Amino acid sequence: MKRRTLDIAFSVGGALFAALLLVLGLVLKDQANFATDYVKDQLSEQKIAFPEEYGRGETDVAGSDCLTTYIGQTVDSGPKAECFANFYIKTHMMHSADDAGYPGETYSSLGGITRALGAELATAQEGTDQTAIDEAQAKVDAANGLRDTMFKGETLRGLLLTTYGFSIFGDRADLAGLVCYLAAALLFVLSVAGLAHAFLSKNADHTVLAAG
């Protein structure tokens, strides 16, 4: 087979593969733009915003410097959603549990606590000591109030972190699209070089012998 034929074959094949990579890059870029726009639109509708100032301990946790970076801004992107969920909501939930006398507890773990307090209230109500009944009722109300707060906080936090995860897929698609563009450009340049060699090289008409 002539060297020119090989050059043309490889160049045409490379050009076709470059075209496929270009199409793939365009598709990935489109999906990345969709993810970015969708996350921004959905979050913006919630009108969640970072406070203009912070209270106790909100910016003391490692990584919470993002709260200062986004201060006063609307939560409208994946990174902002992650920051708000992990360092604002989580901190408030932690302080709520501390203030209620149940440090480290979560919505799930408070279930057993509220059931136990409910049993204590039922036992107190069997007697005639109104003070004991009122104290037991206050404990039940406080635990149920905390559990309701934890449920709302953990639900919103989970939704924001899910949105953040969705945005990461968009970022990965954007990066993959860029790689496809670069690879397509490289293959296109190599294909042009191969065609130039096929038609301009003095040795292009030489026959290439197959091995064996």
Image: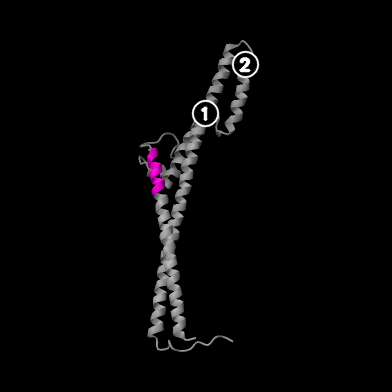
- CA gap between label 2 and label 1 equals 22 Å
The residue under the point 56% across, 17% down is 135
Q: Is residue 92 visible?
A: yes
Image position of 104 (left or right of 201): right
Q: Residue 164: x percent and y percent?
A: 46, 46
Question: Which residue in the structure is indicated by mark 2?
Answer: 124
State whether residue 185 is above or below residue 168.
Answer: below
User: Which region is colored magenta?
Assistant: 37-46
State the image quarter where residue 64 is shown. Answer: top left
Q: Is residue 48 visible?
A: no
The residue under the point 51% across, 26% down is 145
Dot 1 surroundings within 10 Å: few (below 14), some, or many (20 or more)? Answer: many
- Residue 41 is tagged as none
State whether residue 188 is above or below residue 3.
Answer: above
Q: Is residue 128 magenta?
A: no
Question: Which residue in the structure is indicated by mark 1?
Answer: 146
Question: Do tag 2 and tag 1 residues touch (Cβ < 8 Å)?
Answer: no
Amino acid type, residue under disc 2 in the picture: Ala
Colour approach in the figure: one colour
Q: Residue 25: x percent and y percent?
A: 42, 61
Element marked by disc 1: helix
Amino acid type, residue under disc 1 in the picture: Leu
The residue under the point 58% across, 34% down is 108
Element marked by disc 2: helix
Q: Give the main secondary structure of the magenta stretch.
A: helix
